Image (tube, rainbow, N blue to C red):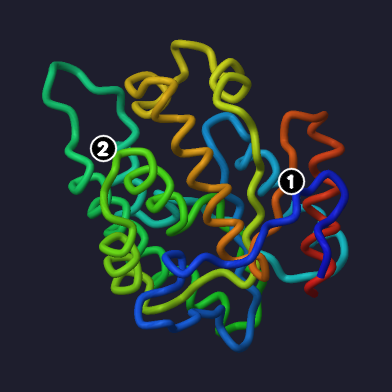
Amino acid sequence: MPPVGGSRPPASEPAHSRRPGGHAYTSSVNGRFITLEGPEGAGKTLQAERLVGALHARGHRARLTREPGGTDLGEQIRSIVLARAEGSGGIDARADALLFNAARAQLVSEVIKPALAAGEIVVCARFADSTLAYQGYGAGLPIDELRAVAAVATGGLAPGLTILLDVSPEVGLARKADDTRNRFEASFDLDFHRRVRDGFLELARGEPGRWRVIEAERDPDAVSRDVLEAVLAIL
């Protein structure tokens, strides 16, 4: 399927971006699993909410969730990993990755897999690709190690469609007021966020069949139309 309007076509898959062991993880056989990814300030929460509303309006059974979060345990972990750091300690990148994957494992077990088994469309704002982009490309942890941990956390579950809302870090960070910024927005420098964005784009190039890249610096209504078009094309 060609990219939708406002999208950028990913290139062919490089060898190092394949799943461990060459396996291609897929969504549940019953429902559809769709994720929205992107750097800070890309509008993932807004677009995920609009997408689920649009799907409901068309008669689809759709469920909205988010990472980290979506469960009691996940929300507790969210409060830890996104809280602005006080003092000089901070959270080690490996600890970050493990915390995010702990929340992810609970979300998959408690929410995503049961919903997919019931034939629902699950829309999740962020999933395992965010850990690859942030703790891998951004913080420098080995991508293969992060993939292996994510495979354990998800039981091999991967989205059937991932929409990357692409925005430059300069634009994305400027959308957040200083007093509303989370730990990643407030404590990590611009170069980190540039690496994260580049990481997302490389992941998209590596799996062109799964990803759709949508330019998200435009009016939110235009972005919403492109997101919905990409999703309806697979339903």
Going from the N terminus, do you reach mark 2 or mark 1 first?
Answer: 2
Work out which residue is located at the far top of the displayed protein and give it: 178
Q: Is residue 126 visible in this depiction of the protein?
A: yes
> Picture coordinates of residue 23 (x, y %)?
44, 83
> Picture coordinates of residue 36 (x, y %)?
61, 52
| Front-lying residue, 34 or 139 | 139
Residue at x-position 38% and y-position 19%: 186
On the rendered structure, is 222 left or right of 157?
right
Helix, strand or loop at label 1? It is strand
| Res. 217 image quadrant | top right
Q: Would you say the residues marked 2 and 1 are in contact, meaning their CB atoms lie under 8 Å apart?
A: no
> Picture coordinates of residue 235 (x, y %)?
80, 74
Residue at x-position 66% and y-position 49%: 48
On the rendered structure, is 23 left or right of 144?
right
Q: Amino acid at mark 2?
A: Ile
**Mark 2 — residue?**
80
Residue at x-position 34% and y-position 52%: 74
